[in-house]
Image (cartoon, grey):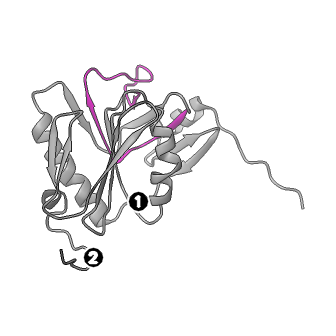
Amino acid sequence: MIAQPIPSYTVEHYLHLERSGDSKHEYFDGQIFALAGSSENHNLISAHILGILYSQVRKRPCRVYPSDMRVKITRTKLYTYPDITVLCGAPLFDDAEADTLLNPTVIFEILSPSTEKYDRGKKFEHYRTIETLQEYILVSQDKHLVEQYTRQTDTMWLLTVHDRVESQLSLLSVNCTLLLADIYEDLELDEAPTEH
């Protein structure tokens, strides 16, 4: 049996497909990867975070983007769609279409069983090369758990774990605060109560 070659796509072909289609895909190294749909908890968490952040950054030179804003990691050439992207300052885009952001300040990823390993590993490796990125936030969708990575230097990130419903997440890079109680409001979580 002869192995079939894997098709390789140019960035231009990928962007044409993304801009003319209804579904979203990541692009890396000539390959296109379909993105899966999201659960109810994922969507509710995303909506809560977007609302909380928007209420705090409005009337400031900051923007909050939902998962339809594509981000290009210039150094590694990954094109992806973070769940939530926050930018303070003037946006830089890849081209005149203004649909591919280059300079995020904060990125949120809401973890799911199919993406958690990637979001924690290879994807974070890509994100760490974005010079403007100051904070990377991983949000569990089935328990009260938010992991905050804050850039200390070009090669060092500080991890802060927020795992109690009364915890407060402070995003110093964009001057915003989120309570876990608000992020997870009205969600049914699988976690068992813990005693402290």
Name the amino acid type tagged 1: Gly
Left or right of 149 in this view: 55: left
Q: Is residue 115 visible?
A: no
Residue farthest right in this picture: 1
* 51 w.r.t. 13: above or below: below
Magenta run includes residue 83: yes
Q: Which residue is mark 2?
A: 191
Give the quarter of the image for residue 41.
Answer: bottom left
Magenta run includes residue 139: no
Q: Which residue is mark 1?
A: 37
Q: Is residue 54 visible?
A: yes
For the N terminus, the quadrant is bottom right
For the C terminus, the quadrant is bottom left
Give the quarter of the image for residue 139.
Answer: bottom left
Q: Nearer the viewer, residue 1 or 79?
A: 79
Percent of width and height locating residue 102: 41, 27
Name the amino acid type tagged 2: Glu
Q: Where does the magenta region start and end?
A: 77-102
The circle drawn on residue 184 is: none
Residue farthest front in this picture: 196
- Is disc 2 placed on a helix, strand or loop? loop
How many angstroms separate mark 2 from mark 1 (CA)? 23 Å
Helix, strand or loop: magenta stretch: loop
Disc 2 crowd rating (10 Å Cα; few below 14, some 14-19, many 20+) is few
Q: Nearer the viewer, mark 2 or mark 1?
A: 2
Percent of width and height locating residue 106: 31, 38
Percent of width and height locating residue 142: 30, 69
Q: Nearer the viewer, residue 111 or 25?
A: 111
User: Which residue is pictured at 46% across the width and 34% down the height?
Assistant: 155
Tag count = 2
Left or right of 105 in this view: 58: left
